[in-house]
Amino acid sequence: MLVKNPKFEISAVSPKQYPKQGLPEIVLVGKSNVGKSSFVNTMINRKKLARTSSEPGKTRQINFYNIDETFYFVDLPGYGYSKMSKKEQEQVGKFIEEYLFNRKEIALIIFLVDIRHKPTDNDKLMYNYVISSGLPFIILANKADKIAITKVDGAVSELQKHINPIGDITTLPFSSERKIYKDAVWDIIDEYIK
């Protein structure tokens, strides 16, 4: 897909702030610092539309990126970041839950996990959470540039064994550095935003 005019639209913490256009939403979930903002920038060929940070836990709101008035990338706050206070974690958890379980526009959830590590307990919790939402989703094994290219397929299979042992959820490698995996993800997104 050729993206011409993507724009950051709004950071929201409650339904009354969500965009009202009714466009399909592609939602990004994953732990803090797994690369959700970099994913957005890579997919739309921009360096800084989504603000990235080396410091985890920066995204504390739901960020809506309007992609050519066709659909939204929706970046949810990451989980598992210990510097957030218990109270902040609860607040963030509440508005994520409210969004995931009530938002009619969600077309697809993209669940990002780090290809280099076994899924954490938090990853497994989020996986179960996404399954219980009943929404379609795929798993992206992110940061594939951090391992040898010859090991990527094996690492994806290994990750899938841990998180989705039945193997019924599409699991693909991704890397913001190596743009080679981008087209496969666009193909899937295209199916869900039509």
Image (tube, helix red, strand yellow):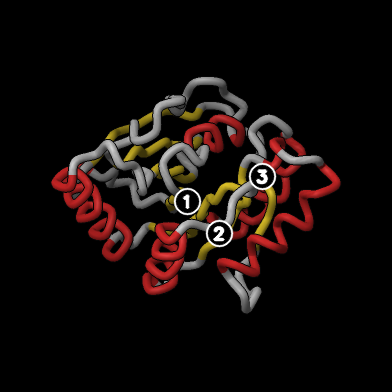
| Mark seen at residue 26 | 1
Quarter placement of the C terminus: bottom right
Say which of 54 and 131 sits in front: 54
Quarter-wise, where is residue 126 in the image?
Answer: bottom left
Task: Please state which amino acid type lies under the numbered disc 3.
Answer: Phe
Q: Is residue 58 left or right of residue 135?
A: left
The residue sitting at 18% across, 52% down in the picture is: 90
| Marks 3/1: CA–CA distance | 16 Å
Say which of 38 and 120 sits in front: 120
User: Residue extending furthest right?
Assistant: 150
Residue 167 rendering spot, x and y as whole percentages: 65, 74
**Vertical position of residue 5 compared to residue 118: above or below:** above
| Marks 2/1: CA–CA distance | 8 Å
Task: Please state which amino acid type lies under the numbered disc 2.
Answer: Tyr
Instruction: Check disc 1 and report its element: helix, strand or loop.
Output: strand
State how many labels appear: 3
The residue sitting at 54% across, 51% down in the picture is: 113
User: Residue extending furthest top?
Assistant: 48
Quarter-wise, where is residue 104 in the image?
Answer: bottom left
Instruction: Check disc 2 and report its element: helix, strand or loop.
Output: helix
Residue 100 visible in the current orientation: yes
| Marks 2/3: CA–CA distance | 19 Å
Instruction: Check disc 3 and report its element: helix, strand or loop.
Output: loop
The residue sitting at 46% across, 37% down in the picture is: 33
| Mark seen at residue 192 | 2
| 2 or 1: mark nearer the eye | 1
Crowd around label 3: few <14 · some 14–19 · many ≥20 (10 Å): many
Q: Which residue is mark 3?
A: 174
Q: Are marks 2 and 1 in contact (CB under 8 Å)?
A: yes
| 3 or 1: mark nearer the eye | 3
Residue 14 rendering spot, x and y as whole percentages: 18, 47
User: Residue extending furthest left?
Assistant: 87
